[in-house]
């Protein structure tokens, strides 16, 4: 429980950690576009190479990256198997009713699985290298245009950052309450759905109460400091583009350009 | 039950950037019948230590998945860890941790936040029902709950059907303590039992603990960062700092180490400070630093001086 893994921020100091969060978000979007533009394995290989580069520069251990993949193994396998079975290709190896396994089908699902894995790893790299606070700062800054059509961007960002901020606190609280009830002989290891549900009540009730209490306290504290929302507020930490961001921007642009070029001039069969 | 800990280590989040060593070679013996104090600054490892006492934190060797590691080259060999509470060997996988928890009651910080049931009686009975081997009759439960509520100074008939959430703060805390002692544990461990209470509430809680120590639980261990609380109440106290035990002494002797305590971020009790100031002014006051004894000693010194002046 002590493992504060939401947002999964991995606290080391690196090139990628220091990038502007806005740029990282935009880079992620560009990367996803590149993945889906890539129409052959050359393109995907380029994407994968860039990703490996990012992981190395972010100084995230590969084990952590693998853990991110492990979370979606089932989804990837499931879609891959479905695609293999239902893709109607020309070189058919095996056929039974509506199912058929073809060479093209296997290639296609391999392609799809790779795409999914790259997608997941790249997005988890964003959360590994960006604190929730700077992530919401970045989102707020990127959504600024929406303010012109009267969408309360600042409030949305505030709600987001409060929600993210409270996750570790509530996790802590949960483990504390759990410990206290275990000290009173509560049994959380028993099997059986009914028993399990019943066992959560002594945790859930105090947890909900404390969440409400904390929300009240936070509201009071904000009132006491005369918080009135986004207008005229300045930021303590201003986001600024630096040479690092320029490098990352160029890398992203080069990746997309490269993928497009490969799509046109390298008509590989797969 | 005698509590013996030898060479206890504990690390949170091992092998990650969040890694923190909370206990670094803690050895401590608490005799049966003591009113023992554990004092230390935030992060000194005192809470981590007491959570070992009823198996909420386990020694690696007591876990099911534990496999003894082969010693590798360059490993620092550590002395063998021993942790026993009475008959229970907490380093052993085969230990019955449920039975241990029944015998070692643990009251956490702000225990009133763990109340959950619809009525006070139900909440107090929670631990009782969890721990009993055979099903207890409603009369047995009611009798045990009544006894527990009365010993913490609450009226059973008035309280039993109330919702625990409509009580006052002090009452809630008493109900929560009743919910722990209802199984009549031999050892009662309390983490900051007086935190967040006003001076009167603090004194009432401490009086309650002395009453429990006399009537219900043979051994009481309190964790605190308040020197006055420890010096007024405990038979012996251990000072924790940076995951280690610095001193284990009766409070009376503990405060001779005022300078070192200051370095650890701990205060000496008010009475000790006053004694030091009086000493500077040329008045020697010999007392054991409880408020009562301090007053007696100061009055005696004052009378003596008056006599001398005459």
Image (spheres, grey):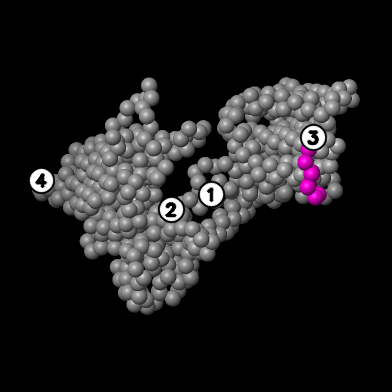
Q: Nearer the viewer, residue A236 or A140?
A: A140
* Alpha carbon distance from label 2 to label 3: 55 Å
* Alpha carbon distance from label 1 to label 2: 12 Å
Q: Is residue A241 above or below residue B189?
A: above
List the residue tagged with mark 3.
Answer: A103
- Residue A229 in percent (x, y) is at 71, 49
Q: Secondary structure under badge 1? A: helix
List the residue tagged with mark 1.
Answer: A171
Q: Residue at x 82, y 26 (%)?
A: A259
Q: Does the magenta-highlighted stretch encompass residue A115?
A: no
* Alpha carbon distance from label 2 to label 4: 61 Å
Whether residues under marks 2 and 3 lie with C-beta atoms below 8 angstroms apart, the answer is no
> Which stretch appears magenta?
A93-100
List the residue tagged with mark 2.
Answer: A179
From this viewpoint, which residue is outermost toward the right? A264
List the residue tagged with mark 4.
Answer: B308
* Alpha carbon distance from label 1 to label 3: 48 Å
Q: Earlier in the sequence, mark 2 or mark 3?
A: 3
Whether residues under marks 1 and 2 lie with C-beta atoms below 8 angstroms apart, the answer is no
């Amino acid at each position: 429980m002590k493992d504060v893994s939401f947002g999964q921020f991995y606290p080391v100091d690196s090139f990628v950690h220091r990038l502007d969060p806005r740029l990282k978000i935009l880079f992620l979007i560009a990367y996803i576009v590149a993945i889906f533009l890539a129409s052959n394995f050359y393109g995907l290989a380029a994407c994968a190479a860039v990703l490996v580069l990012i992981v190395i520069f972010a100084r995230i251990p590969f084990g952590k990256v693998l853990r991110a993949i492990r979370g979606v193994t089932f989804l990837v396998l499931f879609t891959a198997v479905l695609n293999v079975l239902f893709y109607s290709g020309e070189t058919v190896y095996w056929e039974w009713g509506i199912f058929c396994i073809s060479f093209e089908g296997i290639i296609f699902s391999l392609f799809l699985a790779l795409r999914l894995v790259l997608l997941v790893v790249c997005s988890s790299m964003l959360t590994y290298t960006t604190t929730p606070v700077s992530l919401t700062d970045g989102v707020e800054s990127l959504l600024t245009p929406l303010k012109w059509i009267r969408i309360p961007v600042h409030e949305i960002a505030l709600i987001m950052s409060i929600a993210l901020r409270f996750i570790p606190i509530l996790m802590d609280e949960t483990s504390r309450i759990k410990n206290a009830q275990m000290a009173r002989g509560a049994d959380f290891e028993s099997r059986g759905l009914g028993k399990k549900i019943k066992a959560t009540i002594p945790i859930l009730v105090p947890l909900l109460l404390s969440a409400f209490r904390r929300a009240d306290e936070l509201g009071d504290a904000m009132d006491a400091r005369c918080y009135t929302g986004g207008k005229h507020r300045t930021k303590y930490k201003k986001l600024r583009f630096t040479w690092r961001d320029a490098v990352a921007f160029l890398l992203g642009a080069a990746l997309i350009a490269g993928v497009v070029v490969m799509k046109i001039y390298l008509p590989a069969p797969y | 039950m005698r509590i013996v800990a030898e060479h206890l280590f504990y690390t949170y989040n091992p092998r990650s950037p969040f890694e923190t060593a909370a206990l670094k070679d803690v050895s401590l013996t608490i005799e049966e019948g003591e009113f023992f104090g554990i004092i230390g600054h935030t992060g000194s490892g005192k809470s981590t230590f007491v959570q070992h006492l009823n198996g909420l934190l386990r020694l690696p060797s007591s876990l099911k998945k534990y496999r003894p590691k082969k010693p590798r080259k360059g490993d620092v060999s550590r002395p063998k860890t021993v942790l026993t509470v009475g008959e229970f060997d907490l380093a052993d996988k085969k230990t019955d941790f449920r039975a241990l928890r029944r015998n070692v009651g643990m009251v956490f910080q702000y225990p009133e936040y763990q109340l959950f049931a619809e009525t006070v009686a139900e909440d107090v009975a929670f631990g009782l029902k969890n721990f009993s081997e055979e099903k207890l009759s409603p009369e047995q439960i009611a009798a045990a709950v009544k006894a527990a509520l009365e010993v913490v100074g609450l009226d059973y008939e008035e309280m039993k059907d109330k919702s625990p959430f409509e009580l006052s703060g002090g009452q809630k805390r008493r109900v929560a303590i009743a919910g722990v002692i209802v199984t009549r544990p031999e050892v009662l461990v309390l983490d900051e039992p007086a935190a967040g209470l006003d001076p009167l509430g603090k004194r009432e809680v401490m009086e309650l603990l002395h009453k429990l120590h006399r009537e219900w639980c043979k051994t009481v261990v309190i964790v605190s960062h308040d020197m006055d609380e420890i010096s007024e109440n405990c038979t012996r106290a251990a000072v924790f700092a940076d995951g280690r035990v610095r001193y284990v002494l009766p409070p009376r002797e503990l405060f001779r180490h005022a300078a070192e305590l200051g370095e650890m971020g701990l205060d000496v009790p008010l009475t000790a400070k006053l004694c030091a100031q009086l000493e500077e002014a040329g008045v020697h006051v010999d007392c054991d630093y409880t408020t009562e004894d301090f007053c007696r000693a100061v009055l005696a010194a004052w009378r003596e001086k008056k006599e001398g002046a005459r």
